[in-house]
Every structure is written in structure tokens, then in C-alpha cells.
Amino acid sequence: MPTPIEPFTLTGVHVQLEPLASEHAPDLARAGAIDRSSYSYTPVPDGLAEAERYIDWLLTDRDRGAVVPFAQRRLDTGELVGCTRYLELRHWRGRAVPDEVEIGGTWLASTAQRTAINTEAKLLLLTNAFEQWEVWRVAICTDALNQRSRDAIERLGAQFEGILRSHRLVNQPGETRPRDTAVYSIISAEWPGVRDGLVSRLARSGGSHPPGGPPSAPG
């Protein structure tokens, strides 16, 4: 079983990604209650009890080395506005850190959607993956029906790889079905160009980072 990765924080201009913890449950429940109509394809905890179960599930996976989960904190207000994580950590070279990861499980309160927060969070996660962990590949996946998410992933600069049929389970109130997954990826050779594009996008949105990307705590 992989050794769990020691929790760490990634901080940008708009958002801080901090290790998910049990005490985040009340604030995440509040964030998830804001206009739930925006979560059509995304499992988001509904209420405090669900938030507590959601966090317990992710921390159990964290402790067995399967995920690295974060709460997303909006820096201009200090509020928690969602979650994201590394998952599908794959170790090919016998290192403590992974050689391939997926970024996923991402949700944001409706008040934080369509802001610089998501772009910067992805930049922070990608920078850590490629420049600290030196991974070969980062995957970003979504429900094949979720065109809004697919468009956002493509704007990041990720390359479409294909559709995995009946790949994961959608299990939400009123809907349980196998979903087709649209798979995108960025490989290490593509990372400098992707990074520069994300940094430029953030600069246009009012945030700024040095040419090498945002600060990133070692993984």
C-alpha cells in the first residue's frame, strides 16, 4: 500500500488549498448550500451530516495513500468555497511521491464559479505535480455529458484522449447510473506551455504570478 503523502498547503493570489480536515465540515456544508442547481454533474455534500460523511470518506482514502484532498479557501473573504483533490496516484519509480496523478473531485460554491479561483487552483495543483513531484502525466476527467466542464478543461490546455464508457458511477439524489468519462491529460513536455497560458490568464483576471508559476509547498 502506498505511503500517505504528508499534508501540505498551496497558496496563490485568489485561493489557498489547505489539507482537508474534519473541522471544515460546517463551512463546506454552508458553501454547498448556495444554489445547488449548479451541481448537476458534481457530487456535493448537502447539509452538515453529509459534509461530515464526505470528509470522513476522503480522509480514510487519504490515510491509505489513495488521495490528497484539499479544501479551497477564497483569500479575499477567507471563506471556504469548495474542495478538490489529487486521486489515482500511480507510483512507477518506487518514489514516495507519485509519477502520475489525476486532478478531480472538484467543486466550488456557485459564488466562486466563473472566477479566477478555479484557474488558479488548477495552476497550483499542476505546478506542484510537475515541478515538485516531477510527474510524467496529469489526468483531468469529467462526465462526458458535462460540456461546461469539458470546455473549462480544454481552456486549461489539456489534451482530449477519449471516452471511457461506463467508467465511473454517478450516485446522486434521484440518479444512479454508470457514466461515460471524458479523459484529458497534460504530460510533462507540455507543461511549460500550459503553465505560461494559465499564468497569462490569471494576469488578465487581476492576479499575478512569477513566470515560473505560483509558490508551491514541497510535496
Image (cartoon, rainbow, N blue to C red):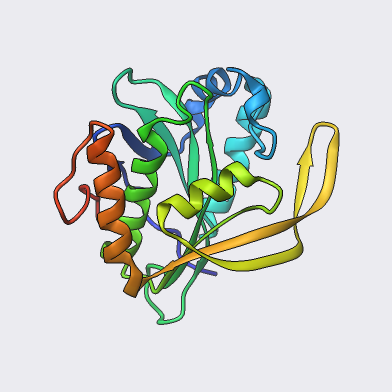
Of the pair 178 and 115, the residue shown nearer to us: 115
- Coordinates of residue 198 in the picture (x, y in percent): 31, 50
Count the marks: how many? 0
In which quarter of the view is residue 10 placed? top left
Of the pair 199 and 106, the residue shown nearer to us: 199
Q: Is 164 situated above or below 214?
A: below
Q: Is 199 situated above or below 80?
A: below
In which quarter of the view is residue 112 placed? top left
Residue at 68% from the left image edge and 65% from the top image edge: 163
Answer with left or right where residue 97 lies relative to residue 42.
left
Residue occupying the far bottom of the picture: 93
Residue at 67% from the left image edge and 28% from the top image edge: 50
Of the pair 67 and 124, the residue shown nearer to us: 124
Q: Is 164 situated above or below 152?
A: below
Residue 76 visible in the shown view: yes
Residue at 46% from the left image edge and 38% from the top image edge: 20
Of the pair 184 and 70, the residue shown nearer to us: 184
Residue 219 visible in the shown view: no
Answer with left or right where residue 54 lies relative to residue 117.
right
Residue at 49% from the left image edge and 43% from the top image edge: 84
Quadrant in which the N terminus appears: bottom right
- Coordinates of residue 96 in the picture (x, y in percent): 37, 70
- Coordinates of residue 38 in the picture (x, y in percent): 63, 27
Q: Is 31 situated above or below 62?
A: above
Residue occupying the far left of the picture: 210
Quadrant in which the C terminus appears: bottom left
Answer with left or right where residue 45 lies relative to residue 160.
right
- Coordinates of residue 138 in the picture (x, y in percent): 45, 64
